[in-house]
Image (cartoon, rainbow, N blue to C red):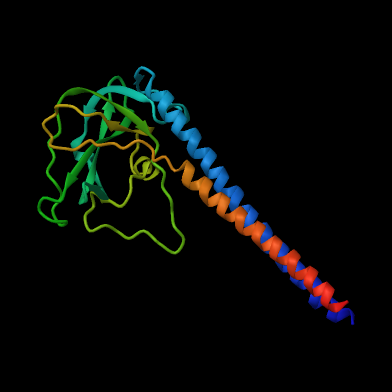
Amino acid sequence: MQMRFLFSRLVPAFAVACVLALLVHLGLWQLGKAERRAAELTQHTERAKLGPYSIDSKLVDFRSLQDARVSVRGRFEPQEQFFVDNKQENGKPGVHVVTPLKIEGGVTRILVNRGWAGWAQGRQVLPTIAVVEGVVDVSGVADVPVNKNFFLMPEHAQSLPQLWSRLDLQRFTAEHNYPVQPVVILQASTTAPDGLIRNWQPPEDRVAKHQSYAYQWFGMALALLVFYIVTSVRTSRSND
């Protein structure tokens, strides 16, 4: 009798409680994502209003510069230039051209994402991009690349040494024996004759979408709870 009660009441109740906890957790997770995205959008808007921050050889705090307008003076190092694969512009495949800049007055470098270029001669031939010689002033927006490693999706070696699957600041810093600023500059549109497209998009506003997902999870939790209560009441009455 006790075993029958255990399987007929306690086991279903435990299973429902576990599923309810999971659904509520997923809802809270989506609400947290919505809050973080809203904070990022506010930060992007507020920092865009500030005057440009001048970067020198002293390493900066990347947390305080994300989305801020910045400027820097130095010399491009085309021999260290590389390309970030799988970038699209108006539906066309291409790469982002990333060139280190040696900051004037020291040995510190900063990576400059100079813009997008298409595969003019196919994927086996990297685009030929002009690099301004001498001392240059570069302005743009500071960005901190986010590198996500997806489970069961190992990185594959690229067919060309200068072709990277992602912009990995840690990798670049580890491969060189000089200090590297922990931010990347998304170069502002200029009249530089390099043919690159600098169409930097603002952060996508996904706050409403995450909130909608959260309400869906909460709604499923409520529906399950109501279903369980109704079923339990009917079962109890039938047993009586």
Quarter in which the C terminus is drawn: bottom right
Residue 201 falls in image quadrant:
top left
- Asked if residue 50 is positioned above or below residue 211 in the image, the reply reads above
The quarter of the picture where residue 178 lies is top left
**The quadrant where residue 23 appears:** bottom right
* Quadrant of image for the N terminus: bottom right
- Does residue 187 appear left or right of residue 202 in this picture? left
The answer to whether residue 14 of the structure is visible from this angle is no
Which residue: 41% across, 27% down? 45
Q: Which residue sits at x=72%, y=66%? A: 228
- Near-viewer residue (114 or 6): 6
Residue 58 in picture, x, y percent from top left: 40, 23
Q: Residue at x 23, y 40 (%)?
A: 80
Residue 49, position as x, y percentages in the image: 38, 20
In this rendering, position of residue 16 left or right of residue 54: right
Q: Is residue 232 above or below residue 208?
A: below
Q: Position of residue 52 (x, y in %)?
A: 34, 19
Query: Where residue 150 appears, x then y in whole percent?
Result: 44, 57
